[in-house]
Image (cartoon, coloured by chain):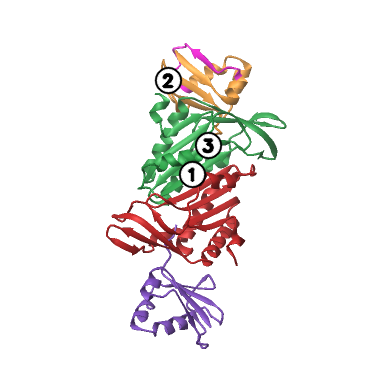
Chain colours: A orange, B green, C red, D purple
């Protein structure tokens, strides 16, 4: 079970802050993205945005990052704090 | 990992902060550090030609603290600095309100200057904050700037 | 030329200053500048292994203001900055007391960081101030540091 | 008439803060220095210190700088403010 969270513009575009994925066959962030993209046309569009960032357990990662049950995966646009 | 692990160096808060109080804490019982550099970022009234009326700041609780702690720890490895404080506000902020504070003390001034700017440059590209701008033409999420990526890449 | 010509950007004074008040003046009616960088220099309790008990600061009235005005004007030519304030105290100062304040505002943070450090680096080698250190081994005039010359030469 | 002022360690070594020179033949800072050095052995010693700085009318100058009646010339050690 993977907890997935979305922030900022992404959260608004998906109209979703958090969801849980139970597919045990997902082993990387890239695979999780593909799974999420398959949900609908809107999700497809959002998850093919090149600038999307991802984090696993609060660390910024790239698509190759492996994930396991219990992980928290986050997707969000480039950050704009400060 | 709780926010308290990072106290007192990091604070993510919706309430305002007081510059003088923060500097007093950095200097308290700290007669060894002769230099104190502060950065304060405030909500500007203009951005790219638009009249801004307010900002709304969102963040990723947990990851924010972790990423700031990592940035501070990198700064401590690179420069000989004493105390550090980073405050970042979240929620809705009006024009002129303080958004972010970075304070660094050191024995020699160049360390505090460099570390402070380094922390700000990295915070800008690595800490999970997002600004939504409320303008006279509606609201919109700010786009990240390539110039910020370049500044962080310089170090 | 009187000191008033440089007001309110430069102040040479024996009394202490208040950081919060100075920053408030830099920010007042200034919603265009989102960045404020401050440097505060204080009397350290140690210098090159000696226990310092106090400092006595002497300066060259008239030339001091003129040299600081020139440094500020150079900073304004080199960076896009808003307001600047430089305060330097003279007379006898105890450990932990504030010696010098430089505050710079700008629209974009790198300008305020660079201009502030530039002003401090040039002040260190060009403004006619001299420190006498009162230590547990007697009093002595501080020697200028080559490292300060090198820092100023970098710009 | 040239007003000459001394600061910090220099002022203490010479035991003098300010003096007036009336020699109208002095045309440069270097010549003024030589004139001052000739006053005594102590002044000779102080004015042959390599690191001495000089200013004319509040501007830092070198020995080539010309001076004229009414100028204020200052001599002092390298500065140590900040």
Residue that badge 1 annotates: B38
Q: Which residue: 54% across, 45% down?
A: C21
Range covered by the magenta-colored residues = A14-29
B121 left or right of B43 in image: left
Same chain, marks 3 and 1? yes
Comparing labels 2 and 3, the label whose residue is closer to the camera: 3
Q: Which of D64 and D80 is in front in this view?
A: D80
Disc 3 is placed on an element classified as: strand
Disc 1/disc 2 C-alpha distance (Å): 40 Å
Residue that badge 3 annotates: B100
Horizontal and vertical percent position of residue C45: 34, 51
Q: Is residue C15 above or below residue B66?
A: below
Q: Is residue B149 above or below residue D57?
A: above
Disc 2/disc 3 C-alpha distance (Å): 33 Å
Q: Residue A67 carries which label?
A: 2
Chain ID, mark 3 = B
Comparing labels 1 and 2, the label whose residue is closer to the camera: 1
How packed mark 2 is, by other alpha carbons closer than 10 Å (few <14, some 14-19, many 20 or more), is some
Q: Which residue: 38% across, 28% down?
A: B5
Disc 3/disc 1 C-alpha distance (Å): 10 Å
Same chain, marks 1 and 2? no
Q: Main secondary structure of the magenta part?
A: loop
| Residue that protrudes farthest toward the left in the picture | C137
How packed mark 3 is, by other alpha carbons closer than 10 Å (few <14, some 14-19, many 20 or more), is many
Horizontal and vertical percent position of residue C80: 60, 51
Horizontal and vertical percent position of residue C41: 44, 51
Horizontal and vertical percent position of residue A74: 50, 23
Q: Is residue D51 visible?
A: no
Q: Which of D74 and A28 is in front in this view?
A: D74
């Amino acid at each position: 079970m993977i907890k997935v969270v979305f922030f900022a513009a992404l959260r608004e575009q998906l109209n979703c802050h958090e969801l849980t994925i139970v597919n045990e066959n997902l082993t990387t962030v890239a695979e999780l993205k593909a799974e999420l993209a398959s949900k609908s046309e809107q999700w497809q569009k959002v998850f093919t945005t090149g600038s999307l960032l991802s984090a696993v357990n609060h660390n910024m990662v790239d698509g190759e990052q492996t994930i396991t049950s219990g992980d928290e995966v986050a997707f969000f646009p480039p950050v704009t704090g400060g | 990992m709780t926010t308290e692990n990072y106290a007192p160096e990091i604070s993510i808060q919706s309430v305002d902060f007081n510059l003088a109080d923060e500097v007093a804490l950095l200097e308290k019982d700290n007669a060894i550090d002769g230099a104190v550099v502060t950065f304060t970022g405030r909500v500007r009234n203009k951005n790219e030609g638009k009249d801004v009326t307010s900002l709304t700041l969102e963040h990723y609780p947990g990851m924010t603290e972790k990423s700031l702690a990592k940035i501070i720890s990198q700064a401590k490895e690179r420069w000989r600095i004493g105390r550090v404080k980073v405050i970042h506000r979240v929620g809705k902020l009006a024009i002129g309100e303080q958004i972010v504070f970075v304070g660094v003390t050191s024995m020699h001034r160049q360390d505090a200057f460099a570390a402070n700017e380094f922390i700000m440059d990295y915070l800008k590209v690595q800490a999970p904050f997002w600004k939504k701008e409320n303008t006279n033409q509606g609201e919109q999420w700010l786009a990240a700037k390539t110039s910020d990526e370049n500044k962080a890449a310089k170090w």
